[in-house]
Amino acid sequence: MHPLNPAVASTFRPPVMEARRWLEGVSFSAERPLINVSQAAPLDPPPEGLRRAIADASLNIPEAHLYGPVLGNGDLRAAVAQRWNAAYGAKLEPANVAITQGCNQAFCAAIATVAGQGDEVIIPVPWYFNHKMWLDMQGIKAVPLFCGEGMIPDAADAERLVTARTRAIVLVTPNNPSGAEYPAETLRAFYELARNSRLALVVDETYRDFDSREGAPHDLFSDPDWGDVLIQLYSFSKAYRLTGHRVGALVASERRMIEVEKVLDTLAISTSQLGQIGGLWGMTHLGDWLAGERREVIARRDAMRAGMEALPGWKLKGCGAYFAWAEHPWDLPSPELAKRLVSEAGVLLLPGTMFMPEGDSSGLRHVRIAFANISGAKIDELMQRLAAFRP
């Protein structure tokens, strides 16, 4: 056997790739094509204007093909700071922003600056599986925090999990996989816990552009000392359909950025220049278009809620942004259910076990449905197929 890093070997294989393997050897008819609700990535390319901006840069800006600044291009960092100041009532400077190779890299960099092997990080469950995978691979213990009503975690419960080895708490809102939008008071309670316990609070807001609420989702940036506690993560991928270009952002104190720069320089040196140009063009020109995308996602959320409420035996536990977290009605483990739904119903979704600690029985009764990429008509058809399925 070749040598293996036990920390890397200990974690699971990428869940979305595992689910795709379930499609091998299965055919779908034109009358009943596959309904793929396994992944949240947009399926359509960016709007034409954004694509033209990238194409023009590729042809006419020679430096777009070279290394850029490790922490990202200054114009995009400034645009993020300006937009966040307007959205959150913040007072950010471009120096508070790093542009990363997608939000996953932003998470990896954030964790690398706060925790190391043998440390602990508290994460609500169900968790985003790539967060758990990275913690595993770094030898960091992921401490599960079980959510309550509406899939909302409680800071008082988290406080009981804090030990001498705890370094950070991670929150995702709107949540992946549950879709839950965390109330501002929940985020404030976790912020105060982190500050009082001298922990970092990492808030992943990948889906902030599709939050159904009006106004700022929290007021954490209003604290003049927010940088002592808060690290915020963001993704351009969902907002501007830039998944293939890998552009994310990390917002933190200038002092932490010194450490973030070390991590990013080692991982990738710099984020794609063309992707950053696309992200900046999107922020500058696609405000009305993005507002329309948000309205459509909210409409699909409403259709999902209505459909699940009418689905016999199913219980919708959380629903928002791109995701629904639902309890199925059968005495059938969710991994087996998910595989059978592919061949028997033409539906690809992810079992709850992919988002829960190993051995946790609740994962066997839940599934995640990534509904944002299918139309209202397809949501209706999904409900019909789930209603007709018999184990």
Image: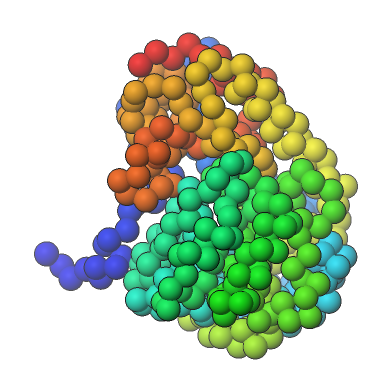
Q: Kindly indicate the quadrant of the structure image that contains residue 374.
A: top right
Residue in the picture at 65% in, 27% down: 304
Residue 248 makes an appearance in the image? no
User: Measured from the top left, where is residue 180 in percent x and y?
Assistant: 63, 45
User: Measured from the top left, where is residue 162 in percent x and y?
Assistant: 47, 70
Check the picture and name the quadrant holding the C terminus.
top left
User: Measured from the top left, where is residue 115 in percent x and y?
Assistant: 46, 77
Residue in the picture at 37% in, 51% down: 357
**Residue lying farthest to the left in this orientation:** 1
Relative to 29, is 94 above or below?
Answer: below
Left or right: residue 55 versus residue 65 is right
Residue in the picture at 60% in, 38% down: 318
Q: Nearer the viewer, residue 377 or 332?
A: 332
User: Measured from the top left, where is residue 247 in percent x and y?
Assistant: 63, 63
Q: Kindly indicate the quadrant of the structure image that contains residue 95.
A: bottom right
Residue in the picture at 43% in, 57% down: 144
Relative to 111, is 280 above or below?
Answer: above
State how many labels appear.
Answer: 0
Check the picture and name the quadrant holding the N terminus.
bottom left
Residue 223 makes an appearance in the image? yes
